[in-house]
Image (tube, grey):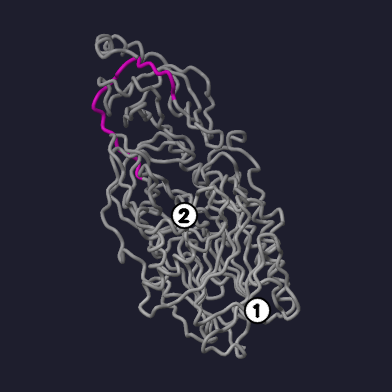
């Protein structure tokens, strides 16, 4: 790296020499595809304006742009010594030699074109004015549905991982595909006007936003809800500020932000904008906390309420979490008659000592609910302990699904619990062989995963069970999406981790439900819980087709953009579903109601109780 004294000393002489030599342009280095046509080549006399400086390099913009929509006029020049050189400032026009390099820190990520081993040959001008490109103006509008032409129209398609951008290196089509759009701006200085947060920041303050441009999937909280074939490529993550300041870590879904200016970059599996300074919240949405459900129980077969809630690594030893979950159940879910819960740990949490019981854990929740309820509501619970270390989740925690039920409203019909290895069956009637009982627990589909718990319920207390149908329920927590690749990743379509396991789980669960309907087409059946998958994705779609159940979101007419229970990256999404038998779904226009209660997706990360929102429904199960 040239020192300041040497650089300024021969500036005038070098100016004449440099301007007489034809060098490679920034546009030629970037090319019109994802990978540079000059990758691995030494290049000379690359001329550009310094648009930004970071801790490990600087960014240049072409002096004379090519005006090719496929080609970025920005370039990252990697070199910490160059970045720290105080003789170089934003607005300087530099002439640089170096080596074109494609860099990524992980084989699953996209490459980023950069100029490595830089050597500044001259500073031609200082203080040149720089105007950032404004995304959303003119032709700079991000595509709103497709990520890549290699996805063949569906970013969520199965089978996935059918091609690699790094191998195919397709021609950029920035007007059609989101990844192509952001790649065509790599290294450029850009501005986002009227930005809003569409996700929560991660531990570093990186925050997903959209600006003043077209979007799809807009929900009432101004987030972007994922839908079939549309993973919202118009969103971009705002990364670490270049001035060393820090982004806030408490921003929330829908927060309005100040105008953001920064450089387009690629890191940690995503395109991103590194802002010149930290983002700032202008306004947050009201109400700050989601209102409670409007659905309440009738206390009879005409209106039984059922809730579902993944309460995230729940065990008795975390008393603050116990109280927070109980508060949600009482105040936000309004103590449904039956509650399917997921991610219940054993009694000592993540201590891996062979404990599988969760009686203390579930008792702690029932006790907390009773203490918080003004009418002294008593819940009983039922579950089946899994085999040790065979149900996934946090090591040693032995997570499982369970039911809580109001003893004054419901009871198990002919209770006869199974165990960790006994498979439930549908007997003539229909009745269940085990109540409750696991569905086919020895099936390889459930390896290192939670087994679905089937149960049959009838009215209790003052209710007359002779006037009510048996309510069959299946509580699921299908296999994790762990191992998935980034929507911005190299694999196209992106890897959907565990999808083959979930397809097998869908078939097993659906077959059991279909057996009940085969005996009684008018049976009252619910399958509910954390499916770990979207309603339109292959596993859930296969379950719906095979089981004969209806998606309750569709049956009651919840608008597609409001179907979300989870925030991940840029997307509001629904991993938690309720599927109802035809007899229950058909009553949607009359008596069936259903709501998602956004107690966790609306709040800051530090304020959430779980990573999932609960849902509540009401059904008429009278004969």
Residue drawn at point x = 40 percent, y = 49 percent: 208
Disc 1 crowd, CA 10 A, few/some/many (<14, 14-19, 20+): some
Asked whether 183 or 198 is in front, the reply is 198
Given residues 80 and 620, the one toward you in this image is 620
Magenta residues span 115-134
Q: Which quadrant of the structure image shows residue 555?
A: bottom right
x, y percent for residue 422 = 71, 63
Residue at position x 53%, y 39% from top? 172
Numbered mark located on residue 414 in the image: 1
Residue 609 picture location, percent across and down: 40, 59
Depth check, front residue: 222 or 505: 505
| Residue plotted at (48% across, 29% down) | 113
Q: Is residue 133 magenta?
A: yes
Identify the image quadrant of the N terminus: top left
- Left of 599 or right of it: where is 543? right
Q: Secondary structure at mark 1?
A: loop
Asked if residue 22 is positioned above or below residue 233 in the image, the reply reads above
- Where is the C terminus found, in terms of image quarters? bottom right
Task: Please name the residue that numbered disc 2 is placed on.
Answer: 571
């Amino acid at each position: 790296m040239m020192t300041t004294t040497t650089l300024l000393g021969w500036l005038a002489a070098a100016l004449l020499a440099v301007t007489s030599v034809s060098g490679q342009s920034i546009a030629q280095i970037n090319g019109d595809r994802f990978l540079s046509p000059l990758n691995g080549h030494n290049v000379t006399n690359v001329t550009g304006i310094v648009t930004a400086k970071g801790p490990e390099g600087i960014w240049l913009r072409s002096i004379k742009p090519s005006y090719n929509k496929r080609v970025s006029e920005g370039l990252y020049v990697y070199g910490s010594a160059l970045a720290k050189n105080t003789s170089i400032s934003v607005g300087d026009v530099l002439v640089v030699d170096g080596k074109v390099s494609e860099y990524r820190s992980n084989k699953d990520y996209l490459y980023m074109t950069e100029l490595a081993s830089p050597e500044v040959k001259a500073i031609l001008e200082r203080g040149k004015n720089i105007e950032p490109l404004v995304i959303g103006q003119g032709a700079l509008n991000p595509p709103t549905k497709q990520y890549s032409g290699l996805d063949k129209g569906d970013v969520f398609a199965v089978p996935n991982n059918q091609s690699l951008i790094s191998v195919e290196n397709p021609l950029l089509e920035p007007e059609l595909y989101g990844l192509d759009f952001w790649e065509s701006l790599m290294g450029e200085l850009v501005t986002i006007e009227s930005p809003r947060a569409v996700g929560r920041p991660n531990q570093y303050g990186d925050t997903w936003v959209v600006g003043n441009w077209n979007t799809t999937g807009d929900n009432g909280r101004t987030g972007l809800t994922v839908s079939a074939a549309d993973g919202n490529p118009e969103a971009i993550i705002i990364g670490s500020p270049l001035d060393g300041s820090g982004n806030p870590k408490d921003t929330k879904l829908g927060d309005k932000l100040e105008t953001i200016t920064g450089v387009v970059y690629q890191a940690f599996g995503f395109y991103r904008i590194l802002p010149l300074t930290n983002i700032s919240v202008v306004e947050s949405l009201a109400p700050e906390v989601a209102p409670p459900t409007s659905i309440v129980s009738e206390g009879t077969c005409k209106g039984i309420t059922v809730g579902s809630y993944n309460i995230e690594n729940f065990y008795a030893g975390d008393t603050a979490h116990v109280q927070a979950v109980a508060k949600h159940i009482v105040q936000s879910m309004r103590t449904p008659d039956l509650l399917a819960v997921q991610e219940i740990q054993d009694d000592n949490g993540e201590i891996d000592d062979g404990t599988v019981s969760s009686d203390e854990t579930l008792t702690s929740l029932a006790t907390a609910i009773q203490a918080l309820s003004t009418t002294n509501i008593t819940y009983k619970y039922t579950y089946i302990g899994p085999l040790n270390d065979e149900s996934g989740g946090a090591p040693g925690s032995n997570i499982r699904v369970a039911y809580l039920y109001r003893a004054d409203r419901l009871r198990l019909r002919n209770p006869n619990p199974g165990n960790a290895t006994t498979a439930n069956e549908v007997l003539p009637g229909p009745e269940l062989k085990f109540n409750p009982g696991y569905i086919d627990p020895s099936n390889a589909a459930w390896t290192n995963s939670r087994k679905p718990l089937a149960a049959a319920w009838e009215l209790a207390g003052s209710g007359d069970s002779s006037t009510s149908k048996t309510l069959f329920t299946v509580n699921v927590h299908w296999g994790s999406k762990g191992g998935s690749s980034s929507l911005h990743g190299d694999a196209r379509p992106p890897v959907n981790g565990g999808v083959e396991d979930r397809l097998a789980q869908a078939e097993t669960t659906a077959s059991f439900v279909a057996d009940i309907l085969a005996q009684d087409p008018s049976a009252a059946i619910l399958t509910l819980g954390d499916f770990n998958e979207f309603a339109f994705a292959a596993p859930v779609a296969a379950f719906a087709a095979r089981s004969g159940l209806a998606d309750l979101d569709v049956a009651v007419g919840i608008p597609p953009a409001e179907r979300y229970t989870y925030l991940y990256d840029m997307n509001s999404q629904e991993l938690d579903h309720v599927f109802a038998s035809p007899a229950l779904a058909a009553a949607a226009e009359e008596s069936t109601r259903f709501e998602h209660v956004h107690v966790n997706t609306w709040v800051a990360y530090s304020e959430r109780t779980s990573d999932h929102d609960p849902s509540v429904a009401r059904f008429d199960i009278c004969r």
